[in-house]
Image (cartoon, coloured by chain):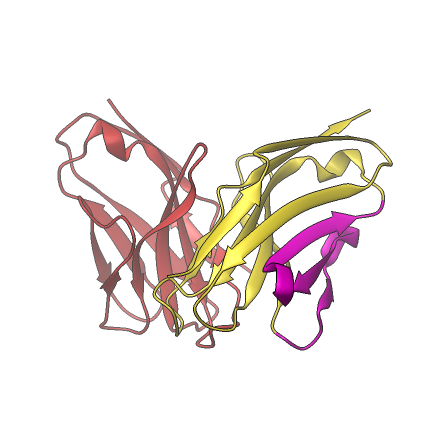
Chain colours: A yellow, B red
Amino acid sequence: AQSVTQLGSHVSVSEGALVLLRCNYSSSVPPYLFWYVQYPNQGLQLLLKYTSAATLVKGINGFEAEFKKSETSFHLTKPSAHMSDAAEYFCAVSGYSGGGADGLTFGKGTHLIIQP
Amino acid sequence: NAGVTQTPKFQVLKTGQSMTLQCAQDMNHNSMYWYRQDPGMGLRLIYYSASEGTTDKGEVPNGYNVSRLNKREFSLRLESAAPSQTSVYFCASSGDRESSPLHFGNGTRLTVT
């Protein structure tokens, strides 16, 4: 079964500082990996996805993530945090049951706080 | 540009009452999903439907039923609501490939007293 672990339920950074949100996955098959962002009282919005085409994936709003198979990681980074980045971030791996279009398995989320 | 539309946005129920959450998508997706979101728990899959006429249980199906009414619509029913079902419910849809991302609605915030 697939699983995702997000290290740190809350991460606080200063405006302009590097953002690093950690995600490790477990999958019985080659994974597809996703990062989503959720702003207050809204649904989830796709930031980026890894589909094996390239290990470094660029997404929206200046975010990127690097797939490292040896570390089973897919950490999300942004060079310079902005106040508007404050939100909940979710890492997800494809397949609830191991294959097919049967949904994503999500991590518990990381709340990103931006200090002025 | 509606995407995935959920109704209602908010609902308060008393224990034992029933209700149906509605979801519709206009992206011609075959796959649709219901998730619940609870603090510190992330999103957990309740039910999904890979195509019209088929539904399957997810991680937390107990206390829920679903109906895939047609390709566009996928409803979630609580027959006898319990306080443990207080949550935010999200509907999503996706394309057929395992690499297809999910597109989410804005959620229904349900409180059961």
Q: Identify the residue at the far top of this view.
A: B113
Q: Residue at x 21, y 48 (%)?
A: B77
Please state the horizontal and vertical placement of residue A2, each as a whole percent of the image: 42, 60
Closer-to-camera residue (B104/A92): A92
User: The C terminus of chain B lies in which quarter of the figure?
Assistant: top left
Residue B68 seen? no
Q: Residue at x 79, y 53 (%)?
A: A62
**Number of numbered markers:** 0
Please state the horizontal and vertical placement of residue B7, each as a whole percent of the image: 37, 45
Closer-to-camera residue (B25/B37): B37
Q: Residue at x 47, y 77 (%)?
A: B97
Residue A102 seen? yes
Closer-to-camera residue (B106/A14): A14
Q: Identify the residue at the far front of this view.
A: A70
Tell me the magenta residue range: A52-79
Q: Where on the picture, by quarter, is residue B1? A: bottom right
Q: Where on the picture, by quarter, is residue B110? A: top left
Please state the horizontal and vertical placement of residue B56, each as a whole percent of the image: 24, 64
Q: Residue at x 14, y 42 (%)?
A: B79
- Left or right position of A16 against A76: right
Q: Is residue B56 above or below residue A19?
A: below
